[in-house]
Amino acid sequence: MSSHQISVTINGEQHTREVEARLLLVHFIREELGLTGTHIGCDTTSCGACTVLLNGAPAKSCTVFAVAADGAEVTTVEGLGNGGLHPVQQGFTEKHGLQCGFCTPGMMLTSKALLDENPDPSEAEIRWGISGNLCRCTGYVNIVKAVQRASELMKENSDG
Amino acid sequence: MAECRGLGHSVQRKEDARFIRGQGRYIDDIKLPGMLYLDIARSPYAHAKITKIHEDTAMAVDGVAAVITGKTLEGFKLAWMPTLMSDQQMVLPVDTVKYQAQEVAAIVATSRYAAADGAAALEVDYDPLPVVVDPHEALKPGATKVRDDKESNHIFHWEHGDADGTEAALAGCDTVVEQKMHLPRIHVASIETCGCVASWNPVEGHLTLYLTTQAPHAIRTVVALVTAHLGLAEHKIRVISPDIGGGFGGKVPVYPGYVLATAASVVTGKPVKWIEDRSENLQADSFARDYHITAKLGSKNGKVTALKLDTVADHGYSDAAANPSKFPAGLYHIATGSYDLENAHVSVDGVYTNKPPGGIAYRCSFRVTEAVHAIERMVDLLARENGEDPADFRLRNFIKPEQFPYQSALGWEYDSGNYGAALEKAMDMIGYQDLRAEQAEKRARGELMGIGISSFTEIVGAGPSKTFDILGIKMFDSAEIRIHPTGKAIARFGTKSQGQGHETTYAQIIAEELGIPPEDIQVEEGDTDTAPYGLGTYASRSTPTAGAAASIASRKIREKGRKIAAHLLEADEADLVWEQGKFYVKGSPDRAKTIQDIAFAAYTNHPQGMEAGLEAISYYDPPNLTFPFGSYICCVDIDRGTGLVKIRRFVAVDDCGVRINPMIVDGQIHGGLTMGIAPALLEEISYDADGNITGGNLMEYLVPTAMETPHWELGETVTPSPHHPIGAKGVGESATVGAPPAVVNAVVDALWHLGVRHMEIPMTPARVWNVLNEHGAAATR
């Protein structure tokens, strides 16, 4: 099995490692770097529990080789708050947008990317935006509310 | 004093702080020094003789440390293990596989990837055998026998109620409807799959098992019983259930992977981790439902009179359901539902087939969804046969509020209810009469719109010790509360949250009883070394059992607190009045001691002759089950070109008794409704005639996304349980139980004028389009 040296910036910190060519980005993040907030929920790129931001765009890290992220900037849930709480994290807490918490990191990162692109999404746009992430607990209603609340908070922050 | 925020407050969840930061600790996050990884090689055949396992082909893979087969386990008498239903299932086969994806061998390696490589490399020779997939075929004489150790494929016959009386009553009815229906195999598909880390310490003879389990204490006892001959003992077994990424019943059973990881840790002397893939989870873990029901319901002069259900239950190759031991078909005999009827009989015949074992719940109290589906479909049919609107027919036939406690024909004593109020509220919220008018207009234009009702009665909170046990262990649950000197507390429970928010809800119950704010109460569950014994979290039992224990333990603490307060206030105990958070002297509200004052005194200034400390434990044996209920109304539009069913509106009025945290209750109902429409519209684990699974991954097994899920509209009524200390009933599963027939009734309603009388589930676009086409109603262009 060939190995390659890669350098990936995760949550602002650069990590250089020798990895197997077949190592998945999600395992690089979880096993090599010990950032266990990124979860694995399936083997068909269906559930989105492993979603991270790859150069700002949501990516299912179970279907990205670590070597393909060489030179990239990755954001995981651990890098979301930057010390405090990101408005998305605040929104999910306030609106009860999570129950077991397993889909939550991926769901929040997808939501952040959605709001970065569309700061004031409609309910239909939010539902479409998060439709690549499965949640078995919440029935999505409160996730939609959480994203709406995050949108409000982001506007308040930029106004203030 | 801080507001204590007990019952009725939407307190933000304590557990969220770690979850939103990615700091939850789930099973796959646990990494122990020197840990090995286990993967499982699985059978490509549904039924086959294993002629040879070439262990060397896996051992040749870099990093592979051991291969475990059925023969290895047979040497330790561990090739088979008992199920909770007194059947047995294989950990690994010694000679024959019984379903596709069955475990064949375990490969232990130094990394996750090496273990997977070893499983892929393992060569196994099979001799395929005839397969039986259909349970009706399996019951015929001469059918392929699934189990070599059994006489036939018939597992059990169970029946309940008055068979002759019901037949006679049906014969005397003026209107009888009959319908066959199949509730297909489905899977809970919690987003976190199952897994474990087993860590055997040979020096101390101690086993630590980190496990995705909803019932850690019961698992510890089972492990102790099945490994006693190997020298393990219960005080040397510690089961830790970490944060659980959804359970829904799928994390109650013991899976072969758990046993294999344990055996591998004993063999290698190192910690061993096993985490299943999603496809393994869907293909091999316990399934739910798979009931083939023939239902008859009759009425006389418009009054529902008699119900008969005959059922064939497909259990796969082993009865690995997780029911209370005395109930092979769970609480299926709640089937008379919300209706006042005098004659009922239900029967279930369990059958072996070449499919995975199971028969567990899918976010439902034992087999209640099957019962509710049957009665709610049949009541709808009977209403129409009587020429009456299904809502009016229900309202007339409901058990009336003044009839509670109500003795059902099948032997349950319903604790409390007001079914008419819930249905009327739902009709009000959705604008039932307006929708009916709109439907008539649309029908005239050729558009397909339907309105469906489900007025369910649940049965949860198992259960009273006189009838409820699992393998002999009574189904109580527990709470242990310790108040620290500074008035803060720690409370531990025999249950285990999988997302339900126990850390918050339980703290609120204690807050209500003792006046200590929820944020001052640390709630812990899931570690058998520290938590009191309990049977765990499933079947919506946590609030009815452990929640009640929290109340009772709190009240014991309060009574000791009264003695301490009397000592501190130099007053007579009888003169003290409790007001949330403090005792004061009757008539002198200023002469008071808070619970915090009392806690401090319990350790610093307690009365002579009294033991120091302030703590209590309760093992709560519920006097009865609780009976949550509700009425759901679903409005659908059906696309005649594609057969797609779109849920336009869905109103859910739930009555779960007293609500502890309304925000959490609503969240439970949202999630339950989503897992209710899922089997109605999308989900099914299906097999072809050779026993090949045709829905075994998340690309084929369609879990609802935010796009298929409607915007739920919730309403509530509150009818407290008269026997629960705070009047709560439990709510985690009501919506999953109640929702499916509302959707089916809506679709049948939309198609009724075409001559459609029933729809099987899931009502996929293809299935609906075929029905439209058969009735000449599919749009072609």
Image (tube, rainbow, N blue to C red):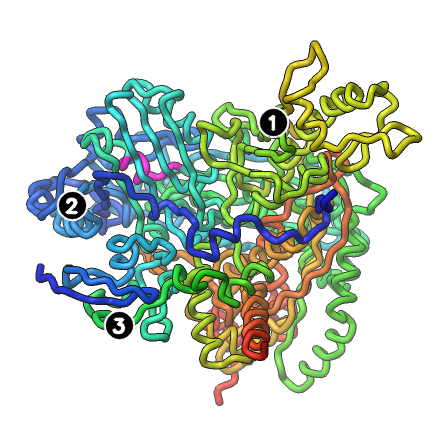
Q: Is residue B460 visible?
A: no
Badge number at residue B163: none
Along the line of sight, the residue nearer the viewer: B209 or B529? B529
Residue marked by disc 1: B467
Q: Are marks 1 and 2 on the same chain?
A: yes
Residue shown at the point (62%, 73%) measured from the top left: B648
- Which circle, 1 or 3, is nearer the viewer? 3
Residue B126 is tagged as 2
Residue B260 is one of the magenta-drawn residues:
yes
Query: Which one is closest to the eye, mark 1 or mark 2?
Result: 1
Residue B532, given in percent of the width and then of the height, sits at: 53, 27
Which of the chains bears the disc numbered 1?
B
State the separation of the CA atoms marked 2 and 3. Answer: 47 Å
The mark lying in front, picked from 2 and 3, is 3
| Number of numbered labels in the structure image | 3
Identify which amino acid the numbered label 1 is placed on.
Thr
Q: What label sits on residue A72 in the rendered view? A: 3
Host chain of mark 3: A
Q: Residue at x 32, y 75 (%)?
A: A55
Q: CA distance from mark 1 to mark 3?
A: 61 Å
Specify whether A146 is left or right of A44: right
Q: Report the front residue among B319 and A101.
A: A101
Q: Magenta region's main secondary structure?
A: helix
Magenta segment: does it hold A146?
no
Q: Which residues are magenta?
A: B254-261
| Chain letter of the residue carrying label 2 | B
Q: Looking at the image, is B736 positioned above or below residue B558?
A: below
What kind of residue is marked 2?
Tyr
